[in-house]
Image (cartoon, rainbow, N blue to C red):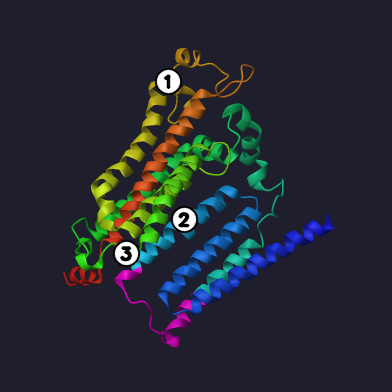
Amino acid sequence: MPASINASLMLDIVLLVMLLVVAGAIVRTRSLLAAIILFSIYSLISAVWLVVMDAPDVAFTEAVVGAGISTIVLLGAILLTRGETEKPDWRKLIAPALICASVGGLLIYAAMGLPELGDPASPANAHVGRAYLQRTASDIGVPNMVTAVLASYRGLDTLGETAVIFAAGIGVALMLGFGPRSSLAPPPAQLGDHHVTLRVAAKMLIPLIALFALYVQFHGDLGAGGGFQAGVIMSVAIILHALVFGLRETMAAIPPRVARSIASLGVLIYAGVGIVCMINGGAFLDYDYLFPPEIEAQIPGWILGDDAHAPHWGQHAGILGIEIGVLLTVTATMVTVFYGFAGRTVDDARREARR
């Protein structure tokens, strides 16, 4: 046992040192491309640390968002600016450094008052957290407790988060505009069909990425995953198609207007599940009322469980329905944001800045 404890402690120290080294490299580098790659590495190390801390769902989200979609969007954004930043005047850094040091000191001081990790007497474990642990199996009937909390017990909060993602994507689209961009012009004919190996590899990877996204979507109530992670992975497949085959081809398959409509459809599906529950006599997003009693009584219990235990058909169907809504909103929003950045050129940015 002491050897395993020491090994775990050493792993935590190594990961923390790696995070500090990468953070220092990000601060020192002047190359924007190098900074983006280092940010991606930082997210991957953070995801590994979260796995060590027994938080696989959070680690999954950090990996697909921090190291995946964020890296791709930032790579598209640096096309609108120079590849390196100017060396700043050190006198202009004094005030920001003092502010960061003050806020960091306050955070460290506040962290000293936090309960120890895994303390059963902490507020998070002593009150509502304990109730979730004791009641999830009988109330929701899904093995993944994180899914039960986010999608059922606190489904209204997740609806708000989905609406925020949708609003953020629409806000970015409004700022960048919806009009045609010069970067969408067809490439010169003399360039030919190059990068054949990359195209063949992409044709093999894109279906596998999309299939894995569907696995994450429908496996969310059994293990790590869910609609948010699946949506980000699905958007990565679409963005990879744009990077390899060209933005024009991807926009022909999924026009920007269709992407924005799908994003709003996801929010409507999520809210629609709650409205159906209200129509059947329950509260908003109370999945136990998703099916009328006479219909739920006709569903055999052996499909999702067994005859001796309640299969919780309403909970399973409700969670699946709202997760599909999250999948659509996240996928379409990420694609919309990418369209906004990747469809612009430096000339477009300068032209709009002069308006």
Q: Is residue 237 magenta?
A: no
Q: Which residues are magenta?
A: 78-99
Quick one: label 2 or label 1, which is nearer the N terminus?
2
- Marks 2/3: CA–CA distance: 30 Å
Tell me the kind of residue under disc 1.
Gly
Which residue is at a point 78% across and 61% down the rendered structure image? 6
Who comes first in sequence, dot 3 or dot 1?
3
In this image, 132 relative to 237: left or right?
A: right
Residue 281's tag is: 1
Q: Decide: few, some or many residues near mark 3? Use Cα within 10 Å; few <14, some 14-19, many ≥20.
A: few
Write the residue at 19% across / 62% down: 185
Q: Which residue is mark 3?
A: 194
Q: In the image, what residue occupies the spot 59% across and 23% down? A: 305
For the residue labelled by badge 3, is the local secondary structure a helix, a strand or a loop? loop
Q: Are marks 3 and 1 in contact (CB under 8 Å)?
A: no
Query: Mark 2 — residue?
Result: 65
Kindly state the secondary structure of the residue where label 1 is placed.
loop
* Front-most of residues 104 and 204: 204
Do the numbered discs 2 and 1 sit on residues whose CB atoms are within 8 Å? no
The CA span between labels 2 and 1 is: 38 Å
Spot occupied by residue 4 in the image (x, y as percentages of width and height)? 79, 57
Q: Is residue 114 above or below residue 26?
A: above
